[in-house]
Amino acid sequence: YYLAEEFVIGNPKEKDSPLRWDRIVLNCLGDPNWDPRRPEVMKWDDVRDCIAGAIATFVDDGRGSGRDSEHSWQVLHCCATRLQHLGIQVALRKVRPPSQRPGAWAGSVFIITTDKIAKSVTQKKKAREI
């Protein structure tokens, strides 16, 4: 699946790609430009002037991220069409709309607001670990 994911990402310099990026940006504590709302290391898209669109997979479940809802849909569409080109089926009926409150994924829940990003686990996962 790794090779398929590399095919989906494609050329990171392609101007029309929703997964394009120009440079790696470090956001380190102590830096005068440090922003606690951003990750420590990120791919940056100079054209959109934001963190680059990305995909994340867990077993057979993939998620896309982008600057806004439209950008996220572009990432998901790019991912789905390229995977289907390779013969890997994508269940579009299972695709959830982009959200900052997407619900549990692999037992983890992320709460994203303008001030912070928090991670928790579902009650079901917590009960299983006890």
Image (cartoon, rainbow, N blue to C red):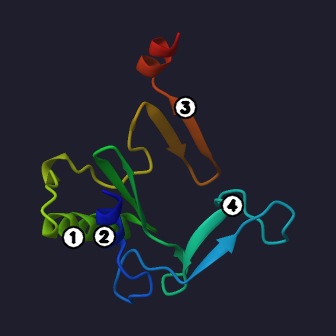
Q: Residue at x 16, y 58 (%)?
A: 88
* The label number, if any, that marks residue 82 in the structure image: 1
Disc 4 or disc 1, which is closer to the eye?
1
Mark 2: secondary structure: helix
According to the picture, the residue beneath numbered tag 3 turns out to be 120
Figure check: 81 above or below 61: below
Cα distance, mark 4 to mark 1?
30 Å
Q: Nearer the viewer, mark 1 or mark 3?
A: 1
Secondary structure found at label 3: strand
Residue at 55% across, 85% down: 46
Q: Nearer the viewer, residue 76 or 58?
A: 58
The amino acid pointed to by label 4 is: Glu
Viewer-nearest of discs 4 and 3: 4
Q: Residue placed at 62% from the left, 75% from the top?
A: 24
Q: Could you tell which of marks 3 and 2 lies nearer the N-terminus? A: 2
Mark earlier in primary sequence (2, 4): 2
The answer to which of marks 4 and 3 sits earlier in the sequence is 4
Residues marked 3 and 2 touching at CB (< 8 Å): no
Q: Quadrant of residue 6?
A: bottom left
Q: Dot 1: few (<14), some (14–19), or many (≥20) neighbours within 10 Å?
A: some
**Left or right: where 116 falls relative to 85:** right
Q: What residue is pinned by disc 2? A: 8
Q: Amino acid at mark 2?
A: Val
- Where does the image place residue 75, in percent across and percent down from the top left? 33, 68
Is 9 left or right of 80, judged from the image as shown? right
How far is mark 4 from mark 3, CA to CA?
A: 20 Å
- Left or right: residue 52 compared with residue 82: right
For mark 4, does the 10 Å Cα neighbourhood hold few (<14), some (14 to 19), or many (20 or more) residues? Answer: few
- Crowding at dot 2, Cα within 10 Å, few <14 / some 14-19 / many 20+, comes out as many
State how far apart marks 3 and 2 are (Cα).
Answer: 30 Å
User: Nearer the viewer's eye, disc 2 or disc 4?
Assistant: 2
Residue under pointer 4: 40
